[in-house]
Image (spheres, rainbow, N blue to C red):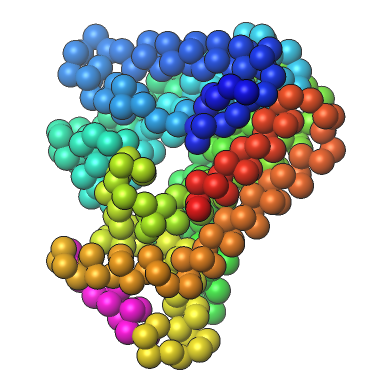
Amino acid sequence: MTVVGPFGLNVRDQALEADVQTGLTAVEEGLLEATKSEVPFITEAAQHLVRAGGKRFRPLLVMLAAQFGDPYAPGIVPSAVVVELTHLATLYHDDVMDEAAVRRGVASANTRWGNSVAVLTGDFLFARASQILADLGPEAVRVQALAFERLVTGQILETAGPQDGRDPVDHYLDVLGGKTGSLVAVSCRFGAMMSGADETVVDVLTQYGERLGVAFQLADDVLDIASDSHESGKTPGTDLREGIATLPVLRLRERAARMGLAEDVALCELLASDLSDDARHAEALAALRTHPALEQARRDTVRYAEEARAALAPLRECAAKAALTDLCDAVVHRAG
């Protein structure tokens, strides 16, 4: 049994492993080529997160989805480069919005060069992704444009918060569908579409990607609370410090409103306070790590991962389907 991709995914078929590894190597080369500029400083900034590594989760999904058609079709690697460039660009922007100091175990671009350079570097990556996309045809452009609209809409909805009367958890899950699910779904869609897979297969894989993407982000929410920086590659409790209510916090508030327990209400008040103070932040993080709300968030992660697994049912049995199923398990394992 061999290992490839994020979370130590086991790929149990040698031919599939070879195809995936070859594809991911080509994607890595494509990312470095796409982030080169005639201006050395732009190259340095644009390659900052590329060279920091990362799970390459989205390109992996492109490669696996392509197995349901011709996995050697010429558009597969470029489409994987497009989705990863788009993802990287959003990270530059997210770190500015969140004032994050660490990303993938290295100083974030905004910490190293300032907010303006980080934002403009993200824009540069979007531009390069668009250039590659233009060569993949109008349908690919349309698919990416719709996904990008959903991604930005999700970010705006997160910033605006739920409307009066809207359940905060439902609102948040909709936000994740836009912010994360959309691009993961496109990764699966591009892989299948570029490989010439049947349209029904393309649709099945797109639905799988949407659900897996939400599960993936929910696992990140859990990790942000439960892990140390070595595990996650970023500072634990970043969202807490910035006052961003991820699912564990929303589940805590829900429980506090429903049960009215003094300790739950007190923790909600602590989380609503100024957590820029390191001692208060550490206290809040420690309390949430042992709270039932974190376990509820883990169960939510499992639910979405199981929905992703169920979406694969119509596909033929093959090594790629087994690997996609294993990814569901890997996401759940990642959340503990």
Residue situated in front as seen by the camera: 42 or 149: 42
Predominant SS along the magenta part: helix
Report x, y in % for residue 261. Answer: 43, 89
Residue 56 seen by the camera: yes
Write the residue at 52% across / 27% down. Answer: 5
| Nearer to me, 116 or 32 | 32
Q: Position of residue 82 (x, y in %)?
A: 49, 24
Q: How far across and down, in percent of the image, does residue 128 sit?
A: 40, 20
The residue furthest front is: 1
Res 45 quadrant in image: top left
Q: Is residue 124 above or below residue 288?
A: above
Where is residue 279 shown, x and y percent of the image? 16, 67
Residue 48 as seen in the image, left or right of residue 298: left
Residue at the image point whose x is 72% and y is 31% from the top: 322
Left or right side of 299 for 128: left
Relative to 80, does residue 36 appear above or below in the rendering? above
Q: Which residues are magenta?
A: 265-276
Closer to us: 299 or 98: 299
Image label count: 0
In magenta stretch: residue 257 = no
The answer to which quarter of the image holds residue 252 is bottom left
| Residue 217 in sight here | no
Q: Quadrant of residue 233?
A: top left
Q: Is residue 215 left or right of residue 139?
A: left
Q: Is residue 148 left or right of residue 1?
A: left
Nearest the viewer among 146 and 242 is 242
User: What's the residue at 62%, 23% (across, down)?
Assistant: 1
Name the residue: 32% across, 32% down.
122
